[in-house]
């Protein structure tokens, strides 16, 4: 799922007409991994790239399409120009508009060369006869022509143009983050119409019923105290000394970023370190009695793994002290992990994929609110406390996701 001079290496830029076909296919394979295409275009238990995965949106459910080279149900009859138009313009082969659950607002930044190589790889897949499912959207969203207006307001079409004031590494990172990697699809907040709040780019947002935390350089609510090496290691292995990936991000790392080159991971990290956020906000004072109750719950339920001082255990349980998810301005991701549990990404370097059990069955809404408020105020952290209403919303979101909503 997701014209610039590419870095030397696996993605080295050479004349397409002179390059052997197998090299184009291998570049396309790499690009498919970088764009995390298989994750969205593969239903649970289904053939890779055959589509059918439900993509939840605030407007209803959209199902990913079959992008294998099957001629009846896939893209086997699509020409390179039709594929380019889908990626670049958000218009499929029959001329109908795609919904931005397919991240064409990011893929539009890809070079034609990269799009052609991606198509060359997809053409080598085993064709799958899998009929595409119609989106479950109410009127007027069920009418694809509505995308004409949406695109006019929120779609900025055009390839990525390098910033001459920045290094080649920074530009490569920007190309991956803002284009193929489509990070802002989850990590940027959206307005009521589903358009990006571009003035808050990468400051945190919602995707697939999870809150995706800030990727800006804020110290508390972001990656401000992460180094380039910290970010690259997290994207490679799913964890570092500061955090461990869970939820949709674990899937991204398993299917996508762990397969990228070291140079590309460092380029992504270099770019993210340059993204400025809104700055730290002063958190309101917490109720001392609630914090005391939360501390008691933490010692009873959490300290065995995460340690009394919140430092966690290296290579096993992530630290909670200084953790960006714990300190995020929106506590939704942390609450979801407390309520429903979480599994850490399973990667080549950390294949176990340790899991945390959910506590929603044994802790009340008030208990979870008190526990979360303690975590957000302990060990020097100064994030806002959590209310019972926040926990209720989280339970509702978890229940909705469990039913495929």
Image (cartoon, rainbow, N blue to C red):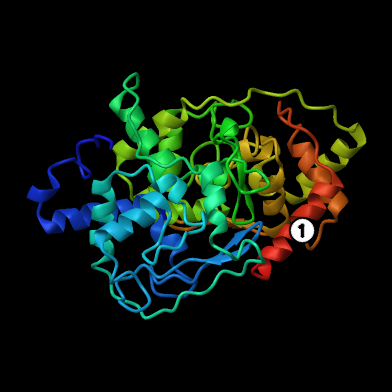
- Quick check: can you spot residue 296? no
Q: Position of residue 364 (x, y in %)?
A: 85, 56
- Position of 141 compared to 28: left or right? right
Which one is nearer the viewer's eye here, 33 or 112? 112
**Position of 142 relative to 194 (above/below):** below
| Image coords of residue 403 (percent x, y) | 68, 71
Q: Residues within 10 Å of mark 1 (few under 14, many from 20)?
A: some
Farthest residue, direction left: 18
Q: Along the line of sight, which residue is nearer the eye, 126 or 339? A: 126
At horizontal 59% and vertical 45% (from top left) the residue drawn is 195
What residue do we see at 63% from left, 66% from top? 137
Q: Quadrant of the C terminus?
A: bottom right
Identify the residue at horizontal 72%, vertical 58% (top origin).
397
* Residue 92 versus residue 76 in the image, above or below: above
User: Dot 1 corresponds to which residue?
Assistant: 395
Q: Is residue 356 above or below residue 191?
A: below
Say left or right for 142 vs 72: right
Q: Nearer the viewer, residue 400 or 114?
A: 114
Instruction: Say what secondary structure mark 1 lies in.
Output: helix
**Left or right: 201 as drawn, with respect to 92:** right
Q: Residue 220: give x, y in percent of width and height.
A: 63, 28
The tally of labels here is 1
Q: Quadrant of residue 25?
A: bottom left
| Relative to 206, 84 lies left or right | left
Q: Residue at x 12, y 43 (%)?
A: 15
Q: Residue furthest right?
A: 289
Residue 115: x and y in percent read 29, 52
| Quadrant where the N terminus is found in the figure | bottom left
Q: Nearer the viewer, residue 266 or 154?
A: 154
> Residue 321, can we see it?
yes
Which residue is most to the top?
A: 165
């Amino acid at each position: 799922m997701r014209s610039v001079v590419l870095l030397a290496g696996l993605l080295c830029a050479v004349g397409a007409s002179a390059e052997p076909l197998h090299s184009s296919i291998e570049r396309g394979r790499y690009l498919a991994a970088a764009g995390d295409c298989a994750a969205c275009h593969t239903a649970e238990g289904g053939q890779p790239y055959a589509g059918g995965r439900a993509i939840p949106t605030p407007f209803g459910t959209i199902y990913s399409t079959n992008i294998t080279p099957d001629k009846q149900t896939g893209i086997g009859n699509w020409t390179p120009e039709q594929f380019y138009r889908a990626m670049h313009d958000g218009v499929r082969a029959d001329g109908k508009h795609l919904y931005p659950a397919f991240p064409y607002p990011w893929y539009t930044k890809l070079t034609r060369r990269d799009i052609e190589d991606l198509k060359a790889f997809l053409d080598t897949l085993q064709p799958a006869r899998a009929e595409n499912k119609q989106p479950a959207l109410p009127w007027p969203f069920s009418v694809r022509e509505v995308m004409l207006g949406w695109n006019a307001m929120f779609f900025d079409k055009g390839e990525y143009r390098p910033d001459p004031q920045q290094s080649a590494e920074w530009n490569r990172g920007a190309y991956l983050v803002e284009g193929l990697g489509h990070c802002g699809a989850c990590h940027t907040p959206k307005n009521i119409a589903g358009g990006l709040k571009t003035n808050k780019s990468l400051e945190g947002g919602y995707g697939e019923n999870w809150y995706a935390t800030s990727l800006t350089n804020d110290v508390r609510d972001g990656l401000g105290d992460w180094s380039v090496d910290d970010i690259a290691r997290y994207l490679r292995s799913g964890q570092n000394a500061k955090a461990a990936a869970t939820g949709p991000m674990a899937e991204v790392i398993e299917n996508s970023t762990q397969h990228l080159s070291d140079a590309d991971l460092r380029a992504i990290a270099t770019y993210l370190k340059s993204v400025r956020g809104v700055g730290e906000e002063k958190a309101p004072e917490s109720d001392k009695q609630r914090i005391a109750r939360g501390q008691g719950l933490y010692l009873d339920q959490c300290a065995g793994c995460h340690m009394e001082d919140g430092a966690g255990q290296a290579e096993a349980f992530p630290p909670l002290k200084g953790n960006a998810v714990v300190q995020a301005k929106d506590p939704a991701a942390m609450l979801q992990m407390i309520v429903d549990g979480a599994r850490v990404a399973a990667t080549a370097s950390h294949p176990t994929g340790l899991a945390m059990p959910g506590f929603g069955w044994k802790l009340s809404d008030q208990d979870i609110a008190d526990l979360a408020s303690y975590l957000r105020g302990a060990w020097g952290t100064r994030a806002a406390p959590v209310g019972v209403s926040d926990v209720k919303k989280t339970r509702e979101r978890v229940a909705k996701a469990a039913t495929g909503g």
